[in-house]
Amino acid sequence: MISLISKTLKTPSFLIRLSSTIFHSPFPLFASYPLRAMTSESTQRVFQFKFNPLTGNAEWVVIEDDQREETALLASTSYLDMLNDSTRNKTFREAIDKTITKPCHVLDIGAGTGLLSMMAVRAMGADKSEASVTAYESYLPMVKLMRKVLHINGMTKDVKIINKRSDEVEVGVDIASRADVLVTEILDSELLGEGLIPTLQHAHDKLLVDKPLTVPYRVTTYGQLVESTFLWKLHDLHNNEATAMDGIHLVPTGSDTILRVSLQQYPMHCDALSRELKLLSEPFKIFEFDFGERPASHGETKLVIKATDDGRVHAVVSWWILQLDHEGAILYSTAPRWIGSPSKMGIADWCDHWKQCVWFIPGEGMPISKGEEVLFHAFHTETRILYNVATQAKEMKLQDFSNTDFHLVLPPERIAIYGDRKWRSSMVTALRNALQKSVDPLCVVADDSVFLTLLVAHLSKSSHILSLFPGLRERGAQYLRAVATANGFAADRVEVVLKRKNLTLDDTCQRKVDLLIGEPYYHGNDGMLPWQNLRFWKERTILDSVLANGAVVIPCKAILRACAMSLPDLWKSRCCLNKIEGFDHSVVNSTLGACGELPAGREVPLLPFFIWQCGETQVLSDTVTVMDFDLTKPMSSCYGKVQVEFTKSGICHGFALWIDWVMDTKDCVVISTGSDQRYWKQGVKLLPWPVEVENRGERSSAIIEASFDPSTGELTFNHSVS
């Protein structure tokens, strides 16, 4: 069997609670941001869970009222994008004004900046004698922002802030009596992921009067069957790798689920795929939840859906419609644009905090004919919604991998990369060239690449391989054991090193390493900025003492690339706040990292995005090289400065940045993660203000410069448009 070199250190487990609700997180779901926090208002401290992208280590550090640190903590969250959603703000204001018509007791769960609380105070009018608004928010940095917002709007005395989760609140201790009205917005793209059900259950059991008024009033989920080659490639590795013809079997025949995506809905801006989708059904209603009633923890829906066209169902696209008032006159929808809507429907402009969701149909999808009836079965738990789809001729079985043999779960984009014929061919070429002159080489896979481990074993039958698997750990070792036979290599040729300390010659039987390789890919770092995968360079530096003279390092070079872009939708979602439905929010701009006139020393942060999903986009310049990183040498500081010539006239909103990985010394094999690549996130640096640029004219170029700090892995980026 695959052997393990194990010296794993035990690490403590932490219970992370980030908000006023039971599960509600201010951080975007399905993204691995390096920041998490625990707070204690009694000491006014923020305990920040900081991740070092160069080492993979994380630790709790205490931040004492440091606004710069709080900015770093909050700028990567979805708060700013949410507050810039004018449709959301307007519909909530209209519904609150309509629902709260007299003084009463109002609870705001997951209060954020206190916007809904202030709306409730204003709706009750001038007579505050019987009015009471209580805002629950357990995330201390946001509590501190809320206090500033309430102060600048003269409402400090009108809203009582409770720095707890709602399920920690007790009537008679924290609040005097049960509340008459609930206002809340604990919704994510899927709907239930922020703990809507358990939060409402506790509120109805402990905090609200019978038959309370609520804003929102009701929410309904919808779905639609679609065909999409792109969505299919995000999950069906078995059938996609069959076309590669390279002899590598990540998903051997008969083990279709051994390497797969998680059984869940994936948030995605599906409008970006509208030209590639084939709609195979009309939209259909799935679940309905009333905020004024205690919801059930589990539920199911069975439907018969008639196919509207011939095709192959690859996915279910889902969304929800929020009914904010009792009559159904005030609505907010996350539906894709192709659905259309009545004039009263509140469909927002592009925003990133709520998207549509995608549920993948297993394998190659389900073939259907126009008019054929499709059986649709939906289930929900307290925090998830799951689907199953079948035709009348096929027995319906819920996708349930809980009792199957071992499986390794990877993100959809990684599954698609591993199934991409061009990417695999590039890796085969680079490794084959590197192994040509090697006899009985010792190879180290520094990252979490199961593909490269199998590829080296396949190409060099005499090689000995050490895989570090810093993120996959034992799961990677289990996977290799499961696929070794199908890939035709002896189990004793691969060792998975699980020790936390650096690799030494004792681990290699005093042999020097001939080949050090990586994609580079680190499991769990999928939401990070592109250059944070320069962790591979750090690994190479640490391993310098065990590398043989003339050892081959793949990739041998990383190149920071950039281009100027028009990103109107993204910029609008990150711009400075002024008044939101009459309430001044300018005080939060610097802390949330908004675009605009920020204090000296403050800049709009570099953030990771799938640019292809960022609404309207346009490239305004050629790609430029900002700096190179020589991965064959130990890590060092780097600096680059370059002029960007605009090739198109337009409005420049910022720059896209990414890494191109050079896999061979002849620069023949390059893996690009650029703005035209859909399986990688790019870094985006937005300008404080949009700038009109010209192909030829006064503003025809820009200067950008960047510096890389090897001690932190941070990239400093500056720019000027002239």
Image (tube, rainbow, N blue to C red):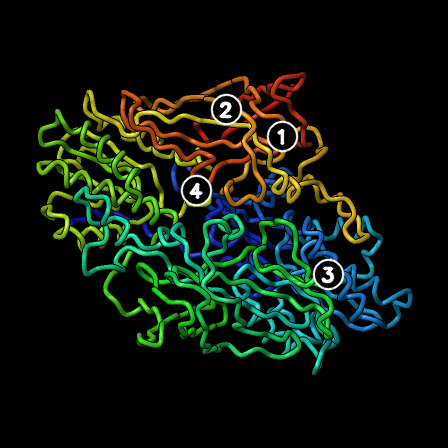
Q: Earlier in the sequence, mark 2 or mark 4?
A: 2
Find numbered disc 1 in the image and state the secondary structure of the residue it sits on. strand
Could you say which disc has been placed on residue 622 in the image?
A: 2
Q: Is residue 141 visible?
A: no
The residue at which mark 1 appears reads as 652
Above or below: residue 209 compared with residue 244: below
Q: Residue at x 22, y 51 (%)?
A: 477
Q: CA distance from mark 2 to mark 1?
A: 13 Å
Q: CA distance from mark 1 to mark 4?
A: 22 Å
Find numbered disc 4 in the image and state the secondary structure of the residue it sits on. loop
Check disc 1: other Cα within 10 Å, few if <14, some if 14-19, many if 20+: many
Q: Residue at x 50, y 29 (%)?
A: 715
Find numbered disc 2 in the image and state the secondary structure of the residue it sits on. loop
Task: Measuring from the top left, give residue 106's x and y in whole percent.
Answer: 75, 70
Q: CA distance from mark 2 to mark 4?
A: 19 Å
Query: Label 4 is placed on what type of residue?
Result: Arg
Task: Measuring from the top left, give residue 67's x and y in whole percent.
Answer: 65, 40
Check disc 2: other Cα within 10 Å, few if <14, some if 14-19, many if 20+: few
Q: Earlier in the sequence, mark 2 or mark 1?
A: 2
Q: Earlier in the sequence, mark 1 or mark 4?
A: 1
The residue at which mark 3 appears reads as 91
Q: CA distance from mark 1 to mark 3?
A: 31 Å
The residue at which mark 4 appears reads as 678
Find numbered disc 3 in the image and state the secondary structure of the residue it sits on. helix
| Relative depth, front residue between 408 and 327 | 327
Above or below: residue 633 compared with residue 477: above
Task: Measuring from the top left, give residue 472's x and y in whole percent.
Answer: 31, 49
Q: CA distance from mark 3 to mark 2?
A: 42 Å
